[in-house]
């Protein structure tokens, strides 16, 4: 990465009122973390150069989303040859798949992913059929192990992730270790397959072996969101790991201190997932991005329910009413990607909403630290809005919230991503 460089990207914004997509040139200056925007349609400056340290270069990758002054922007492409040449290798993508034999360790593996500097671009849990597993491994058709790997891959849920990093493919494969977990325990004892795998088939994780394979595997898992749909949508509760607990996940977790936590330097999604799995079962998981309208729509259930409190948003201190409380929560949920999970009891027969709500703790993270220090919000939350976790409040709302997220009833954001039913400015 060049010092003092000015990088250019093409970004788009879906105007929720007019349903029009606007395109801009977005400039990022590394010398002072300042940004600029130019309106492509009207050929004029849209935003003069201004310092904005909250936006970092590592988050400006193709397909990435970020929020700027309440507008959710999607990075569509590099804006010039210099940016493409400088950043394309630094923002390589690869596909990681956490296999069924390692699904109980999904939190630990996600923690390793973030701790090693990867950004997660996409993620979803799915349960492949035998035919879908055979399609995924079609490059190995006819080999002696083909039946074993397809049978194992369809034996339970898996989690697919699209990762972004410099030389992501080789970096992820190095973390994985040798294909055979028995060999990995000898040659690479600290590798993922050595720690979580058991043999050549049950070897914890898969990794793309080339850029073309990564593209094919990305299309396989993420083009059709109904592939291997595994949400139960009954006897469930919804858990959202909020953006502030995910957004800076590429920071090394071993460096976290209480000062980091209080300052909002967060990124502990894997740790939270691992804690949940010690008491519950996760039956669906997806990395989701809401636009502000979708976030407000999601929180409509809580309109008039949220109590008054003091919260800081965008550097303005507001004595909030219930309405402002909902606005604040919607603002936090729409600033970046969050991890959505359908959580159930292992038996799958009882409603877990009340038990899981107690496990998360009261909404006010500061109160949690004093009264319920072992709860998730006490350990990873900051205040009432940035409280690390959203969980369903009422037993009758668990299915409703899970259905909203996992059947993608927030389509406006997705439609903007794939250009359906919108006019392009």
Image: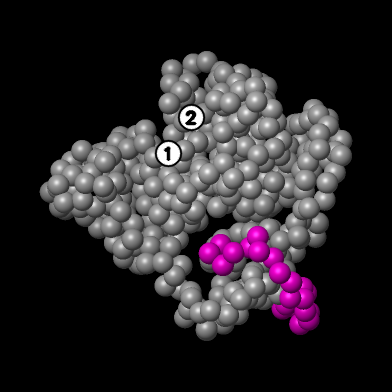
Instruction: Quadrant for the C terminus, please.
Output: bottom right
Rendered residue at 76%/31% (across/down):
302
Helix, strand or loop at label 1? It is helix
111 sits left or right of 383 in the view? left
Q: Nearer the viewer, residue 34 or 44?
A: 34
154 sits left or right of 357 in the view? left
Check disc 2: other Cα within 10 Å, few if <14, some if 14-19, many if 20+: some
Q: CA distance from mark 2 to mark 1?
A: 9 Å
Residue 212 appears in the rendering: yes
Q: In which quadrant of the rendered view does residue 300 lie?
A: top right
Q: Nearer the viewer, residue 172 or 52?
A: 52
Measured as percent of width and height from the top left, residue 409 is found at 65, 42
Residue 425 appears in the rendering: no
Rendered residue at 57%/37% (across/down):
380
Measured as percent of width and height from the top left, residue 113 is found at 41, 50
User: Which residue position holds label 1?
Assistant: 107
Measured as percent of width and height from the top left, residue 187 is found at 16, 51
- Verify whether residue 92 appears in magenta: no
**Sequence-first tag of 2 and 1:** 1
Measured as percent of width and height from the top left, residue 337 is found at 59, 50
- Verify whether residue 48 appears in magenta: yes
Q: Which residues are magenta?
A: 38-59
Helix, strand or loop at label 2? It is helix
Q: In which quadrant of the rendered view does residue 77 lie?
A: bottom right
The colour scheme used here is: one colour
Q: Nearer the viewer, residue 403 or 32?
A: 32
298 sits left or right of 350 in the view? right
User: Which residue position holds label 2?
Assistant: 276
């Amino acid at each position: 990465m060049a010092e003092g460089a000015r990088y250019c990207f093409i970004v788009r914004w879906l105007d929720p009122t007019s349903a029009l997509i606007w395109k801009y040139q977005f400039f990022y200056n590394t010398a002072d973390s300042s940004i600029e925007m130019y309106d492509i349609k009207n050929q004029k400056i849209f935003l003069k150069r201004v310092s904005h340290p909250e936006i970092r270069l590592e988050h400006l990758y193709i397909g990435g989303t970020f929020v700027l002054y309440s507008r959710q922007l999607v990075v569509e492409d590099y804006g010039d040859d210099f940016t493409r040449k400088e950043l394309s290798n630094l923002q390589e993508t690869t596909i990681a798949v956490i296999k069924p034999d390692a699904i109980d360790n999904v939190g630990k593996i996600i923690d390793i992913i973030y701790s090693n500097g990867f950004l997660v671009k996409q993620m979803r849990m799915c349960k492949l059929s035998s035919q879908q597993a055979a399609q995924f491994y079609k490059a190995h058709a006819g080999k002696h192990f083909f039946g074993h790997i397809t049978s194992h891959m369809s034996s339970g849920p898996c989690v697919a992730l699209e990762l972004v990093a410099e030389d992501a493919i080789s970096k992820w494969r190095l973390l994985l270790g040798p294909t055979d977990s028995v060999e990995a325990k000898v040659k690479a004892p600290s590798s993922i397959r050595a720690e979580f795998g058991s043999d050549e088939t049950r070897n914890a994780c898969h990794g793309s072996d080339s850029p073309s394979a990564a593209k094919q595997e990305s299309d396989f898992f993420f083009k059709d969101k109904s592939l291997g749909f595994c949400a139960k949508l009954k006897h469930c509760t919804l858990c959202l790991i909020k953006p502030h607990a995910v957004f800076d996940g590429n920071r090394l977790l071993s460096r976290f201190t209480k000062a980091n936590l209080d300052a909002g330097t967060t990124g502990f999604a894997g740790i939270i997932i691992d804690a949940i799995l010690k008491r519950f079962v996760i039956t669906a998981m997806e990395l989701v991005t809401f636009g502000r309208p979708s976030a407000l729509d999601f929180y409509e259930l809580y309109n008039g329910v949220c109590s008054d409190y003091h919260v800081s948003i965008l550097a303005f201190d507001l004595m909030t009413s219930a309405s402002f409380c909902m606005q604040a929560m919607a603002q936090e949920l729409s600033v970046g990607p969050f991890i959505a999970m359908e959580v159930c009891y292992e038996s799958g027969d009882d409603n877990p909403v009340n038990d899981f709500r107690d496990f998360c703790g009261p909404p006010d993270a500061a109160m949690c630290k004093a009264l319920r220090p072992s709860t998730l919000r006490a350990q990873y939350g900051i205040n009432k809005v940035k409280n690390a976790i959203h969980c369903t409040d009422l037993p009758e709302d668990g299915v409703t919230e899970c259905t909203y997220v996992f059947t993608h009833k927030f389509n406006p954001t997705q439609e903007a991503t794939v250009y359906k039913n919108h006019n392009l400015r």
